[in-house]
Amino acid sequence: MAPTPQHDTSDELIPRPERSAGALRAALAKVAPARLEEMQRTMDAAFSQAIDEKSLTPIQAWLLAWSRDIEIARRLDLRVRYERAQDVLTGYDKGEHDDEEAVNNALAEISAVLDDAQRAVCG
């Protein structure tokens, strides 16, 4: 069962999916279909690693990482914060500005968004 959201749910594009490969794939197809190939590649790698290590840890880590990323993509509040911070970093990388304080703030914001999304999916 999904944890109870602690935010305004009116900004959700879709409900939070269950933490299973099929549910995450279906959710990603709705909120970020361009990332489906990436998801498949990372899933294949996680399963190969799990077999090599005889451990479920890589699969659990994969499920958690994609649950977090889908949380960001499905919630407009998180998505907007993440994209704004990414834009600052992209501008810096392209030489459009040299504002190191803005870069540090953007990195902190990305970290905060990742933390918020992780807390949301972990309960």
Image (tube, grey):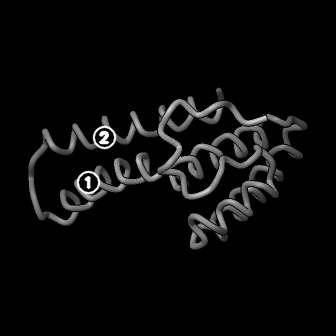
Q: Identify the residue at horizontal 68%, vertical 60% (top origin).
A: 27
Q: In this view, does 43 lie above or below 56?
A: below
- Give the amino acid type for the residue marked by disc 2 in the picture: Leu
Q: Identify the residue at horizontal 48%, vertical 33% (top origin).
A: 116
> Mark 1 touching mark 2, by CB under 8 A?
yes
Give me the C-alpha separation between circle 1 and circle 2.
8 Å
User: Looking at the image, which is closer to me, 107 or 8?
Assistant: 8
Q: Identify the residue at horizontal 29%, vertical 54% (top origin).
A: 84
**Image quadrant where one finds the C terminus:** top right
Which secondary structure, mark 2? helix
The picture places residue 106, in percent across and down from the top left corner, at: 26, 43
The picture places residue 76, in percent across and down from the top left corner, at: 44, 53
The picture places residue 98, in percent across and down from the top left corner, at: 9, 52
For disc 1, the marked residue is 89
- Give the amino acid type for the residue marked by disc 1 in the picture: Leu
User: Looking at the image, which is closer to me, 53 or 30?
Assistant: 30
User: Looking at the image, which is closer to me, 104 or 80?
Assistant: 80
